[in-house]
Each structure stands twice: as structure tokens, then as C-alpha cells.
Image (cartoon, rainbow, N blue to C red):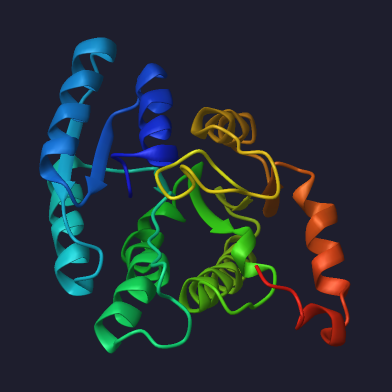
Amino acid sequence: MGASAGVGRAICEALGACGAALILVASDERDLDALASHLRLVYNVDVQTVAADATRLTEFIEKISQSVAAFGQIDSLYFPIGASLAEDQGHLGLEDVAGILNTNLTVVIGLISCFLPQLIELPQAHIVGFSSIAAIRGRKSNMVYSAAKRGLEAYFESLRHLCAGTGLHVQLYRLGYVATQQSYGKRLFFPVVSPWQVVHEVLNNQGRDIGVQFFPRYWVLIARLVSWLPWAIYKKLDF
């Protein structure tokens, strides 16, 4: 999900290089078609595409379910999908709020619910989600986005508990700053990592019971510091 850019595109490239058959999901059909043609040509793998808008929840899930039914058994779900708005500071309209919640949280839960019964029966399967450092602590920017990512983390913790003792590995990455269109040109406090660095970490942890992991790892310390700041100090910060 979110296959056409950033971390999603890098995951597709890496899995294609490993010979995996793929279903690519994103909103832009032209981007998907170009990526699918590239993967078929370079890696000679089976690639299908689903162009769907994650803000339209029911339609999104139905399109993917139909594609999977034609594709056959799947053994992994990757969710480098997300959306945010610069205006997300407490006064978004209902449609924008629903769009952010659907894209970052609801479609992930809905799709996992659809495919969990078959995945949990496999000897080995993977569900990999991607949260954000924005979920560490609420702040006046990206309010709905942060709430959605925090909800995603709670859901993945429950999912991991449900799947304990099965062959289904549930992993969640709390990503720091990644070189994408969202970070381009911004003045950021800490270094930006490439999508390929993220994917290298994901593939290295394939099949491991890591649960939740920050990437880059130094965000563990930053998160602790931010979490421990007294409210009297935290409320004065502007970020």
C-alpha cells in the first residue's frame, strides 16, 4: 500500500529484486503502471496494480480484495501509506479529517481484518506497518495525523498480541525524517534518511519478532526526552 513513492516504491524494488510476485496499491494509475512495467522488465516478476483512493474506504478495500482474489494466496502486507496536511492544526473540515484518518489508520485496520484469517494460518507471513515520530507526543501541528499514527501503534500492539505463537510476524517502524516529498526543502532538527535505508532495515528484520522499532535508532533517546519533559516546559515549545 502506498507503492508508488518513497518507502513504498523502495520496498517494491527490493522485493522485486528478491523475485517476489507483487500487488502494488496507490492512488495514481500512471505511476503504478510505470513502476509495474519497470519491475516486470528488470526482475521478470509477476506484478499487478490497484489504483485506489484510500480516502474512499469501502471502495479501496473492495478493489484490493478483488485483485487478491484473482492473484492468489498472499503472504505479506506492507503499509508505507500515509497522508498529512500542513493545515492540520485543529480546524480541518470533516472531509479532510476523515481523509487523514482513513489513509493513516482505518484502511490499514480494514485490510488487515480482511486478510488476517488466511495470513494467520500460513507457516510464515508478515504484516509490516509504519508509524511516525509524530506519535511520540501530541503537539499543535499535525494533530489528526499524530492521533491516527498513535492509534495505529495501539492497533499493531493488539495485533502482535493476537498473533503471538503463530507464524505471522507483526512489525511496526516508528520512522524519523525520511527523504520524501513531505520533507523536501524543510529545515529539520535531525538528519534525513533515504527510503533505501529504511527498506534495508525492514528486510534485515524480516521474520524477526521485533515488535516496535524506531528508525533511525537514535530516535529512541529523543523520544524518551520528549516524553519526559514536564508539561510546564513542553507547552512552551514551538514545533
Q: Is residue 71 left or right of residue 21?
A: left
How far across and down, in percent of the image, does residue 180 sit?
Answer: 44, 41
Give above or below for 174 relative to 199: below
How far across and down, in percent of the image, does residue 145 sit?
Answer: 47, 71
Can you see residue 210?
no
How far across and down, in percent of the image, does residue 103 sit?
Answer: 34, 66
Viewer-proximal residue among 194 and 152: 194
Give above or below for 208 relative to 219: above
The residue under the point 86% across, 64% down is 225
Q: Is residue 72 left or right of residue 217?
A: left
Viewer-proximal residue among 182 and 16: 182
Give above or below for 93 relative to 107: below
Can you see residue 78?
yes
The residue under the point 54% across, 42% down is 178
Viewer-proximal residue among 237 and 38: 237
The residue under the point 59% across, 48% down is 187
Q: Is residue 203 left or right of residue 92?
A: right
Tell me the quarter of the image containing the C terminus: bottom right
The residue under the point 21% across, 42% down is 72
Residue 191 occupies which quadrant of the picture?
Answer: top right
Give above or below for 154 relative to 8: below
User: How many dots with numbers?
Assistant: 0
How far across and down, in percent of the image, does residue 89 sit?
Answer: 48, 80
Q: Is residue 210 left or right of residue 156?
A: right
